[in-house]
Amino acid sequence: MDLDAITKHSALHAKPSGLVLQYGTAGFRTKAEHLDHVMFRMGLLAVLRSKQTKSTIGVMVTASHNPEEDNGVKLVDPLGEMLAPSWEEHATCLANAEEQDVQRVLLDISEKAAVDLRQDAFVVIGRDTRPSSEKLSQSVIDGITVSGGQFHDYGLLTTPQLHYMVYCRNTQGQYGQATTEGYYQKLSKAFVELTKQAFCSGDECLSLKVDCANGIGALKLKEMKNYFSEGLSIQLFNVGTTGKLNHLCGADFVKSHQKPPQGIEMKPNERCCSFDGDADRIVYYYSDADGHFHLIDGDKIATLIGSFLKELLLEIGESLNIGVVQTAYANGSSTRYLEEVMKVPVYCTKTGVKHLHHKAQEFDIGIYFEANGHGTVLFSKTAEMKIKRLSEELEDKKRKAAKMLENIIDLFNQAAGDAISDMLVIEAILALKRLTVQQWDVLYTDLPNRQLKVKVADRQVISTTDAERKAVTPPGLQEAIDNLVKKYKLSRAFVRPSGTEDIVRVYAEADSQESADSLAHEVSVAVF
Ligand code: 16G
Ligand code: ZN
């Protein structure tokens, strides 16, 4: 590495003085105009990480569901996972180094992480549709090339597609071809195989309305639609030609406002879904005959998928261990349903995909979803091999079930939660089980809940334990919450400092909306 050249180039991507940013839950995220230096430096860091792991590393330029003016960046590790925690710290150090310290920090990281600087480096890059993304990804490329790394720029991609590319490249194509065609082919083949039995001749094909949040999901779904012309008819809305990214639409808007996005025509009982701005989250919904809006969030998605997988396992008579991973935001009714009705073990982790993903890796079949719609299912290598073997050995109904499982493994993005892949899994399950969206919705009834944001002087004074369900500091806060919770029926509440905004989040649920609202309000007052 030519450190002098790096220093010279770094000056062209100067850090605004006094700006301090942190590699948070999903990388760096802030106003796009403050990110040029971060992008350049993440190019440098990706090269180091690639040298250290002797693997291809990914860099994704996106700010997901944030407003269009924001942007962000995150690194993707060799198996398509989120960057390892120790490297998140390196990322923060490097992003915040003053100009004259960049060289030293780079050397520091190389030393601490035992990076062999003579190794080759290869980085792949993807970006979302934000106006600022193209230029910012050029700054990443600048960082990669000046430090002697090689790269492939995929241009516009969904976040999960980039995770997929990284995973494919580091497993020598065993997982799939590292191209968008490879991705479409893998998923559509699995979908078509899986749904073959579902349609009788004369059946109307499945129809679904998709709100694409005016983002990258629209472009990619449009491309992909050509791969399965039969079986599923998708109508796209908010495709980005007129509306603004994530503005009054998208999965985050629908989930947090609990109402339909603008720009979609919903007829009673029609199945609709929303992606977020980088297409790694999905929620479903419909409006009933009385015009009431029904949200089907990540918890209910996990339940549908979990019960389907469990049925298939019962059919083939194999006992693979299934676990469902949720966060504190999971609706209490979903947890109860999973544990008491479906009899599957449920685990709770801290918020943020990396925590859920990590926990889900402990099972033969690890199902993880955040209530906000981010999630996927992971199959262990052993489970995958067993299912493959059974699909060859078994006969009749059992063989059919094993084949279905085999296709489902291919249909899930094993590297990251993926709105397109999850959508296809859900559509396939609904078709196979002949379930309407209403029948899916009534599996259980969500407890009324409320989320609030509280602005405090320093959100870090709040620390939590027990997967963010209990406050440790400040002293007395948890006791206060416990006393408030006692006043309501079927109630639960917690507070946690946000990992993405300078606020504290409050969550409350109870037997009625009034109670949930009032509990959330009372807890906010206790925090303040
Ligand atoms: C990020 C996380 C998401 C989490 C959210 C919580 C990833 C890819 N994304 O968007 O999973 O739900 O942060 O935000 O990990 P908060 O800390 O502000 O509540
Ligand atoms: Zn996202």
Image: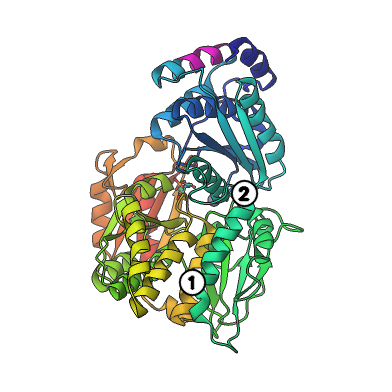
Q: Residue 69: x and y, percent?
A: 67, 43
User: Is 201 on the left or on the right of 93, as rendered?
Assistant: right
Which residue is at the far right?
A: 242
Three-letter code for the amino acid on which mark 2 is drawn: Thr
Q: Residue 303: x and y, percent?
A: 37, 68
Residue 489 in magenta stretch: no
Mark number, residue 179? 2
Q: Residue 312: x and y, percent?
A: 34, 72
Q: Quadrant of residue 261?
A: bottom right
Mark number, residue 194? 1
Front residue of 261/393: it is: 393
Which residue is found at the position 37% from the left and 77% from the top? Answer: 443
Q: Mark 1–mark 2 contact, CB under 8 Å?
A: no
Q: Which quadrant does the C terminus fall into?
A: top left
Q: Which quadrant does the N terminus fall into?
A: top right
Q: Which residues are magenta?
A: 100-107
Q: Residue 406: x and y, percent?
A: 42, 64
Front residue of 266/160: it is: 160
